[in-house]
Amino acid sequence: MSKTSIDKALLEERHRLRSRSASLHGHGADHPAQELERVAAHLREHDIRPDVYGAGEYVEAFEQEVADLLGTESARFMPSGCMAQPIALRIWAERAQNFETAFHATSHLELHEEHGYRELHGLNAILLGDPSRPTLACDLEALPDLSSLLVELPAREIGGQLPDWEALVELTARARSRGIRLHLDGARLWEAQSFYERPHAEICALFDSIYVSFYKGIGALAGAMLLGPADFIEEAAVWQRRQGGTLYSALANIVSARTRLAHQIKRMPLYRDRAREVAGLWRRMEGVTVLPDPPQVNMFHLQFSADATALAQARDRVAKDCGIWLFGGLRAKGGTCSTELTIGEAALGIADDRLAAAMAQLQA
Amino acid sequence: MSKTSIDKALLEERHRLRSRSASLHGHGADHPAQELERVAAHLREHDIRPDVYGAGEYVEAFEQEVADLLGTESARFMPSGCMAQPIALRIWAERAQNFETAFHATSHLELHEEHGYRELHGLNAILLGDPSRPTLACDLEALPDLSSLLVELPAREIGGQLPDWEALVELTARARSRGIRLHLDGARLWEAQSFYERPHAEICALFDSIYVSFYKGIGALAGAMLLGPADFIEEAAVWQRRQGGTLYSALANIVSARTRLAHQIKRMPLYRDRAREVAGLWRRMEGVTVLPDPPQVNMFHLQFSADATALAQARDRVAKDCGIWLFGGLRAKGGTCSTELTIGEAALGIADDRLAAAMAQLQA
């Protein structure tokens, strides 16, 4: 067999192993048809008319619901955060006639979006502060004038870290005093709320515009929302059209998001508590570091002083022997490696003793 | 009641009337759940794994299928044509280091996309020739250097008109001889093929890049494809990410499109023939003009020498009395008005005598 076929066979074998095991990460894998069937049943039960190019009673009611929850005037359902966030920064830039923005060096916009903010929107971004900790007020010192500052709560790439409430208030007040518009990257706002234990609207009141996601913690098919003042959202809808994001219909994604949101929000504290328990089990392991420790939300990183290839093989063996899939992709760095764990429904169903046994097996 | 509530009540009444009647336009209205149920059943029956951020066996096999059908090297599923087409023009512009493009004055990019090609991609478009006829080779005379030329087949806003084959070959050859890249707006390529009666690949061979749509004639949930050389499509995938169009998953849209395409393509000649029959009935009516006459594809415009408000009321009355919804939105122009009719499954099920009686009733 060629190298490619061996790689493919290995991937297939891993896919089979993972789907037969209880995953520690995420919400567990339903059959791909399941969410569509749930949405279809909901459509049969209620008299819901499809949205047409972003307009329609159902989607507009959903937008108002989320706007009310987050305390903003208006909201717009969009296909993705990758679409929503550069649009927000572009609008603030146009208004200020200033295309300078700033965010954390590990922001999704910098790492995972092919620099659409720059290539499509002509924005220039200053990457702020020490990449290993959240953005703080001191990071704004000695910066040129900015039209906007994007803050991700929690910062995913550094294990879901959050500034404490006082630091967040100080950061946003400092920016505001300089006339900088604040945009919240709330891809995991639902998770951040379980850390601050303040109403969503109190967190969001620190920001001028907000993006939230519905497929990550919420577990919907796909989709995002951009929120802010009514005139801002009107402009955003025009940019959404320009970017090709105003679809003929997005009904399945909209129904999936709306029907899951209320239920999933309530589960976030459970996920956070379980994340702390699971992290506690990892902490006891030799050669494993939990980051941050303790986790602040329902996610954290694990750093292993082990070779990535060997560790992946050990994980596969544990899945075969114990029926638990301990983690997914490993990022290698020298002779060590790391992974990201997000705790959701799946981990709630795995007992601690079974989990500890699987972890022990990893180093056997 | 306020003016707004009266308008809303009228819209509601019209929605009820239309959904109770046999529509002459389109494919007929299924329950919004139906296509999702069909997709879910297909997922249960076959072992299909969801795409993840645009990658996956199923979507890639679909892309290859359409690339093979259209005779291109490569293809990429995208959320919408509004996303796909400016990306194509941008790539050709970057390669030529020339941001001048050209298209028909009624192009979708000019009329319905909030000028994303300009505002996002910095392209400048020259609007070509006489807006009441398709683009012809003579329209290229005396133009500055262009990186690309976009040709919509058929031109929707002028009733689905097409240049004849010789004129199309002349246009594309003229452009090619000047080093201009040719992009096909094939939102209705499936329909155009039934006019040219040549293989899809023979039509597409005249172009460097092609966009096709899956929700219009094909009747899928939503979605589009961009096609061209492999290196072009690789670049397009990067731009798709930048525009926020690489979704966590688009499985429902992909399965809907792939499973409907093969079946629907075969129906296009039926729709075209039926369109000619239906147009023949309209032609006999006093004060009604069919454009183009005869229709070239399965769509045409109707121009009425009648007031739009009065005609809409007459249409509602016909729906009530005869159970046929003759047309939808009317565009008023002075004391006259016009509408667009696209013939699909729905019109195949309406007998000529019933239809003629309904039309007669319209002027009663």
Image (cartoon, coloured by chain):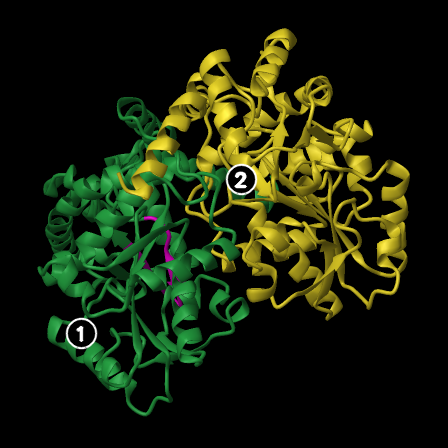
Chain colours: A green, B yellow
Whether residue B37 is visible to the viewer of this picture, yes or no, is no
Q: Is the residue A259 above or below the residue A300 in the image?
A: above
Can you tell which quarter of the image residue B32 is in? top left
> Which chain is home to disc 1?
A
For this view, does B78 lie left or right of residue B172? left
Start and end of the magenta stretch? A328-340
Give the mark count: 2
Magenta region, mostly helix, strand or loop? strand
Name the residue tied to disc 1: A168
Q: Is the residue A96 above or below the residue B280 in the image?
A: below
Name the residue tied to disc 2: B223
Can you tell which quarter of the image residue B155 is in? top right
Q: Position of residue B165 (x, y in %)?
A: 87, 37
Q: Residue at x 27, y 38 (%)?
A: A28
Q: Position of residue B44 (x, y in %)?
A: 41, 22
For this view, does A246 lie left or right of residue A298? right
